[in-house]
Protein backbone atom coordinates (compact mmCIF):
# COMPACT_ATOMS: atom_id res chain seq x y z
CA UNK A 1 0.00 0.00 0.00
CA UNK A 2 1.49 3.41 -0.99
CA UNK A 3 2.29 6.00 1.61
CA UNK A 4 -0.42 8.62 1.96
CA UNK A 5 1.63 11.75 2.28
CA UNK A 6 2.09 14.47 -0.26
CA UNK A 7 5.55 15.51 -1.24
CA UNK A 8 5.96 19.16 -2.00
CA UNK A 9 7.60 19.58 -5.36
CA UNK A 10 9.28 22.81 -6.39
CA UNK A 11 7.55 24.26 -9.43
CA UNK A 12 8.35 26.97 -11.89
CA UNK A 13 6.72 30.31 -11.20
CA UNK A 14 3.40 30.98 -12.88
CA UNK A 15 3.11 33.50 -15.66
CA UNK A 16 0.26 35.83 -14.86
CA UNK A 17 -1.53 37.82 -17.56
CA UNK A 18 -0.79 41.55 -17.62
CA UNK A 19 -4.39 42.36 -16.65
CA UNK A 20 -4.09 40.28 -13.47
CA UNK A 21 -0.80 41.93 -12.57
CA UNK A 22 -2.15 45.44 -13.17
CA UNK A 23 -5.32 44.78 -11.17
CA UNK A 24 -3.36 43.26 -8.29
CA UNK A 25 -0.91 46.16 -8.18
CA UNK A 26 -3.76 48.67 -8.27
CA UNK A 27 -5.52 46.90 -5.40
CA UNK A 28 -2.38 46.94 -3.24
CA UNK A 29 -1.58 50.58 -4.03
CA UNK A 30 -5.14 51.61 -3.16
CA UNK A 31 -4.90 49.86 0.23
CA UNK A 32 -1.25 50.62 1.01
CA UNK A 33 -2.09 53.27 3.62
CA UNK A 34 -3.99 50.65 5.65
CA UNK A 35 -0.87 48.51 6.22
CA UNK A 36 2.51 49.12 7.86
CA UNK A 37 4.48 47.96 4.80
CA UNK A 38 4.18 46.97 1.17
CA UNK A 39 4.77 43.35 2.11
CA UNK A 40 1.97 43.40 4.71
CA UNK A 41 -0.44 44.80 2.12
CA UNK A 42 0.66 42.19 -0.43
CA UNK A 43 0.34 39.40 2.10
CA UNK A 44 -3.26 40.44 2.79
CA UNK A 45 -4.31 40.94 -0.84
CA UNK A 46 -2.43 38.07 -2.51
CA UNK A 47 -4.66 35.18 -1.35
CA UNK A 48 -7.74 36.97 -2.65
CA UNK A 49 -6.21 37.02 -6.13
CA UNK A 50 -4.52 33.60 -5.98
CA UNK A 51 -1.12 35.25 -6.39
CA UNK A 52 2.02 34.70 -4.34
CA UNK A 53 2.70 37.52 -1.86
CA UNK A 54 6.35 37.85 -2.88
CA UNK A 55 5.49 38.02 -6.59
CA UNK A 56 2.89 40.66 -5.83
CA UNK A 57 5.37 42.63 -3.71
CA UNK A 58 7.89 42.62 -6.59
CA UNK A 59 5.19 43.85 -9.01
CA UNK A 60 4.20 46.66 -6.64
CA UNK A 61 7.79 47.76 -6.05
CA UNK A 62 8.44 47.72 -9.82
CA UNK A 63 5.29 49.79 -10.39
CA UNK A 64 6.55 52.29 -7.79
CA UNK A 65 9.93 52.46 -9.54
CA UNK A 66 8.24 52.96 -12.91
CA UNK A 67 6.14 55.78 -11.40
CA UNK A 68 9.26 57.46 -9.98
CA UNK A 69 8.27 56.85 -6.36
CA UNK A 70 11.28 54.62 -5.67
CA UNK A 71 14.82 54.42 -6.98
CA UNK A 72 15.85 51.60 -9.27
CA UNK A 73 15.84 50.50 -12.88
CA UNK A 74 12.53 50.96 -14.68
CA UNK A 75 10.82 48.19 -16.61
CA UNK A 76 12.03 49.69 -19.89
CA UNK A 77 15.61 49.82 -18.62
CA UNK A 78 15.40 46.21 -17.44
CA UNK A 79 14.08 45.10 -20.84
CA UNK A 80 16.86 47.00 -22.61
CA UNK A 81 19.45 45.46 -20.29
CA UNK A 82 18.07 41.98 -21.00
CA UNK A 83 18.24 42.60 -24.76
CA UNK A 84 21.79 43.94 -24.51
CA UNK A 85 22.92 40.93 -22.48
CA UNK A 86 21.42 38.60 -25.09
CA UNK A 87 23.23 40.53 -27.83
CA UNK A 88 26.54 40.34 -25.95
CA UNK A 89 26.05 36.58 -25.48
CA UNK A 90 25.36 36.14 -29.21
CA UNK A 91 28.37 38.27 -30.18
CA UNK A 92 30.66 36.30 -27.86
CA UNK A 93 29.42 33.06 -29.41
CA UNK A 94 29.99 34.42 -32.93
CA UNK A 95 33.45 35.59 -31.91
CA UNK A 96 34.36 32.11 -30.63
CA UNK A 97 33.16 30.58 -33.91
CA UNK A 98 35.25 33.06 -35.91
CA UNK A 99 38.32 32.35 -33.76
CA UNK A 100 37.93 28.61 -34.30
CA UNK A 101 37.47 29.13 -38.05
CA UNK A 102 40.54 31.37 -38.31
CA UNK A 103 42.65 28.79 -36.47
CA UNK A 104 41.37 26.05 -38.78
CA UNK A 105 42.08 28.00 -41.97
CA UNK A 106 45.48 29.20 -40.69
CA UNK A 107 46.48 25.54 -40.27
CA UNK A 108 45.14 24.64 -43.70
CA UNK A 109 47.10 27.44 -45.38
CA UNK A 110 50.32 26.87 -43.45
CA UNK A 111 53.09 26.23 -46.04
CA UNK A 112 55.03 24.05 -43.59
CA UNK A 113 52.26 21.41 -43.71
CA UNK A 114 52.81 20.68 -47.42
Image (cartoon, helix red, strand yellow):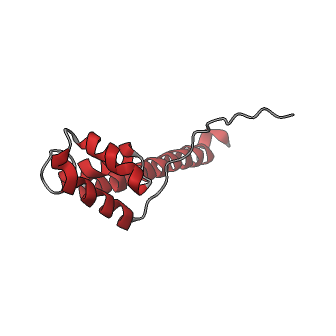
Q: Quadrant of residue 63?
A: bottom left
Residue 10: x and y in percent read: 57, 39
Residue 53: x and y in percent read: 37, 44
The residue located at (67%, 36%) in the rendering is 6
Which quadrant: the C terminus? top right
Q: Quadrant of residue 25?
A: bottom left
The residue located at (15%, 44%) in the rendering is 71
Placement of 67 over or under 99, stated as above or below: below
In this picture, residue 95 sits left or right of residue 64: right
Q: Residue furthest left?
A: 69
Q: Nearer the viewer, residue 6 or 59?
A: 6
Q: Nearer the viewer, residue 73 or 19?
A: 19
Q: Residue furthest right?
A: 1
State whether residue 86 appears in this view.
no
- Total marks shown come to 0
Q: Nearer the viewer, residue 9 or 74?
A: 9
Residue 103: x and y in percent read: 55, 43
In this picture, residue 53 sits left or right of residue 25: right
State whether residue 114 appears in this view.
yes
The residue located at (21%, 39%) in the rendering is 37
The residue located at (87%, 34%) in the rendering is 1
Q: Nearer the viewer, residue 85 or 99?
A: 85
Amino acid sequence: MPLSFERKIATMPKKYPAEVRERAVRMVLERLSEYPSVYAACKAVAPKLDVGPEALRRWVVQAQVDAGQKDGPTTDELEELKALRAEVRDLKEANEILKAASIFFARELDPRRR
